Image: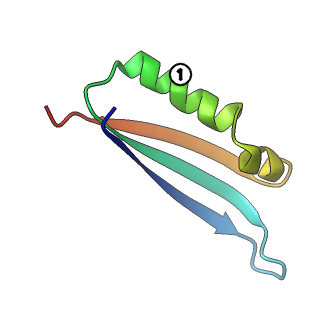
């Protein structure tokens, strides 16, 4: 992998404090990558190793996806 960019978008409640109810993480992976290995890495990053996501999970629906941008 040559580079990675992560874009996070979300929805918050319309009250104070404005708690996030939904969050979406989009990974842009640059390089020549095996799609199955990339999916596994992204899934593990979000579902197992992300302490922020684990903290938010009780109140927030978190989704994720990725795209591979092969610049070869």
Picture quarter with the C terminus: top left
Left or right: 63, with 58 as reference point: left
Left or right: 10, with 6 as reference point: right
Residue visible at 75% across and 72% down? 13
- The residue lying toward the viewer, choosing from 18 and 68, is 68
**Res 31 → quadrant:** top left
Q: How is the image coloured?
A: rainbow
Residue at the extreme bottom: 16
Residue at the extreme front: 2
Q: Is residue 53 above or below residue 43?
A: below
Label 1 environment density (alpha carbons within 10 Å; few <14, some 14–19, many ≥20): few
Residue 49 x/y as whole percent: 70, 35
Left or right: 70, with 49 as reference point: left
Residue visible at 21% across and 33% down? 70
Residue 35 x/y as whole percent: 37, 21
Left or right: 16, with 24 as reference point: right
Residue 57 x/y as whole percent: 80, 47
Q: Is residue 18 above or below residue 20?
A: below
Element class at badge 1 = helix
Residue visible at 34% across and 32% down? 1
Q: How many numbered callouts?
A: 1
Q: Which residue is mark 1?
A: 40
Residue visible at 81% across and 81% down? 15
Q: Is residue 18 above or below residue 67?
A: below
**Res 17 → quadrant:** bottom right
- The residue lying toward the viewer, choosing from 62 and 35, is 35
Residue 66 x/y as whole percent: 43, 38
């Amino acid at each position: 992998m040559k580079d990675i960019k992560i874009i996070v978008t979300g929805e918050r409640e319309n009250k104070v404090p404005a708690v996030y109810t939904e969050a979406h993480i989009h990974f842009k992976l640059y390089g020549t990558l095996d799609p199955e290995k990339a999916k596994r890495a992204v899934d593990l990053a979000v579902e197992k190793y992300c302490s922020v996501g684990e903290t938010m999970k009780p109140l927030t629906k978190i989704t994720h996806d990725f795209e591979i941008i092969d610049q070869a």
